[in-house]
Image (cartoon, helix red, strand yellow):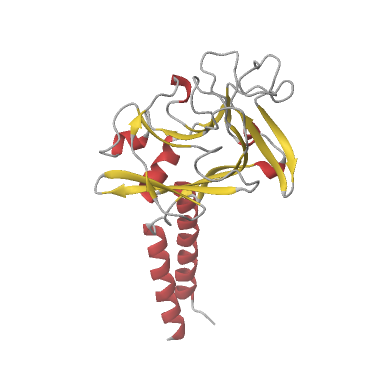
Amino acid sequence: MMNTYVRRLLLAAACALLVSAITAHSASAAILFSYDSTTGQLPTDQGWQAYEIDLDGPLTAANIAGTTAANANAAMESLVGGSALHLRDTLTDAAFDLPNYYYAWTPAQQQALVANGLKFTMVWQGLATTGSGKGNVRFGFNGTEFETQAANIGADQAIEVLGFSSTLAPIDGAFHTLVVTGQMNAGNFELSYKVDGGASVPLSIIANPSPAQIEGSLYFGAQSSANRGTDLYVRSVVVETLNVPEPTAASLLAVGLLAFAWKRKQG
């Protein structure tokens, strides 16, 4: 039987492991926030917020006509493989004509991404439209930890990926995958993207043209109030840390205690 001393060591190690697990999870969980349209829910049902989204009425028949008072610019649709969010950039009753969904990431989430790297994955399908066929994912860095800690990200700046209904992938009736990654390198937070596992494309830091309400958030949807025409299905969006967090002091202590206790037991 184990003596009292070994039992105490094992108990201390178990407690340290528990503290380590809780600390690691709260500091930087693998997935920080996400959206899954296959549930049949809108992003607003899963923690996202709507900007100039209107759900009243049918989707506008023509992308260059209609207002949100009479026509929707977002809807859930049933497809093979599950539901998808259908977004359309059309005229709105507001000033910017920017229907999109945005996530107001918290300072803690931003810090987790700065420290452990950022991975953004979006599964989408572009649709043939009568308009310009644009679309946008934008990370607004205003007032965020990225702006504070990265030398290459100044005030009022952002990154964006464009062309979801025309440029990034063919309109072929299939879903495609965009992956944006970023991590600190010599004091700069460097970002790039890939589509369907293709070549990596560096992303430039740009002046942030977003309205004040969404300039410090991550969003997807329309690109420009002056150019309407985005039509796309969104299947899912996932934002997670790129790397596994470094082991905490508690976890290192736990490993040491377990090893020592095991050695005492065997001896």
Q: Is residue 171 above or below residue 252?
A: above
- Picture residue at 49% right of the left edge, 78% below the top: 3
> Is residue 264 rendered to the left or right of residue 175?
left
Q: Quadrant of the N terminus?
A: bottom right
> Is residue 121 rendered to the left or right of residue 250?
right
Q: Quadrant of the C terminus?
A: bottom left
Q: Position of residue 180 (x, y in %)?
A: 45, 46
> Is residue 28 rendered to the left or right of residue 237?
left
> Is residue 148 rendered to the left or right of residue 64?
left
Residue closest to the far front: 130
Nearer the observer, 38 or 18: 38
Nearer the observer, 72 or 249: 72
Nearer the observer, 11 or 126: 126
- Picture residue at 62% right of the left edge, 24% below the top: 63
Nearer the observer, 115 or 195: 195
Q: Position of residue 230 (x, y in %)?
A: 57, 30
Give the mark count: 0
Residue closest to the far bottom: 267
- Picture residue at 38% right of the left edge, 70% below the top: 256
Q: Position of residue 31 (x, y in %)?
A: 52, 48
Q: Is residue 5 above or below residue 153?
A: below
Q: Position of residue 117 (x, y in %)?
A: 39, 49
Q: Quadrant of residue 261?
A: bottom left
